[in-house]
Amino acid sequence: MIGCAAAAASGGCSDLTHTSWFRGRFREMSDAEKKDVIADLEKQHSERFAKAVTVGAEPPLEGVEFGYALDISRCIGCRRCVYACVEENNQSRDPQVHWIRVLELDKDKGIDLAHANPYYDAEKVPRDGHFYLPVACQQCQNPPCVKSCPVGATWTEADGIVVIDYDWCIGCRCCMSACPYGARHINLMEPHIPAEELNPKTHYLGNRPRMKGVVEKCTFCIQRVRNGRYPACVEVCPVGARKFGNLLDPSSEVRYVIEHKRVFVLRSELNTRPRFIYFYGL
């Protein structure tokens, strides 16, 4: 198993068995192989964190293509979404890893990413003369990150979620360089999650504990949405700025937004065709 072998050489994957080094790509495994791998991971994680940890492998739902819409006229920059994402998706607390960045922008300049401020004081929002733009993985229909991966460790699932097989990631960071949204993040140090803070309900391609030297990113909370729930950031938003649903369902919230609101996508000139759109509530 390329990724884990590389990470083991640099001090990562310390909790994985020798046999996991030779694990195949998840999407190429048989059902029996997936069952064995998942049982092994559940045992390892449960022992490591001293609590019962489950690792799901729910496949894409039939007739579903997930889409996301964010109302920038409502977002107040409180960053509750950032920390709800951290808690739900088992991101490292030390060093900190955040899959969502919220940018503070000047209303007079509009979407001027070159002068955006990601380090504003969230205790003093919303600030007069400014608006806020949360950015995470855009779940592109034409993802440059997938094309750039030399080992096929990342791909697009049938429901539109771009996933990463952590056990095949070699940490080369080609995908990070290719992503025009800065949405991919690497664990350069051993990730740390206090046992009492671990979310024990995980997915193989989502929020299971990661190792040093691999890239990770937003998966629309794959462990939640494939079980009929909203992403954590949608649930926590205090102003209802976030909408989520099935792009193939004409009655879904996200389709309503697309058909009735002023919408835009980031870096449209790059033809990445995001499934994550922004809109004005007016």
Image (cartoon, grey):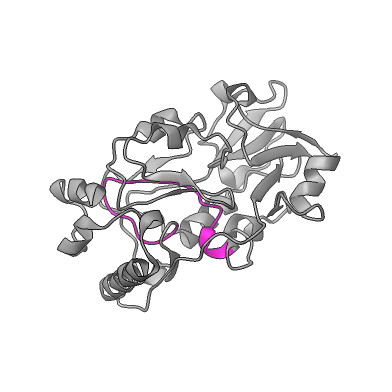
Front one among 253 and 151: 151
Q: Is residue 246 visible?
A: yes
Q: Is the magenta stretch mostly helix, strand or loop?
A: loop
Residue shown at the point (55%, 37%) measured from the top left? 120
Residue shown at the point (60%, 58%) measured from the top left? 231
x then y, percent, for residue 39: 32, 74
Front one among 250 and 48: 250
Q: In this view, does 151 lie above or below 249?
A: above
- 132 sits to left or right of 202: right
Front one among 86 and 215: 215
Does the magenta-highlighted stretch encompass residue 4? no
Front one among 12 and 80: 12
- 6 sits to left or right of 253: left
Number of marks present in the image shown: 0
Residue shown at the point (65%, 37%) measured from the top left? 132
Q: Is residue 281 visible?
A: no
x then y, percent, for residue 110: 70, 24
**Which quadrant of the structure image shows residue 26?**
bottom left
- 262 sits to left or right of 40: right
**Which quadrant of the structure image shows residue 28?**
bottom left
x then y, percent, for residue 181: 52, 32
Quarter in which the C terminus is drawn: top right
Residue shown at the point (77%, 55%) measured from the top left? 252
Does the magenta-highlighted stretch encompass residue 218? yes
x then y, percent, for residue 274: 61, 37
- 262 sits to left or right of 151: right
Q: In this view, does 106 lie above or below 160?
A: above
Q: What stretch is highlighted in magenta?
A: 206-224
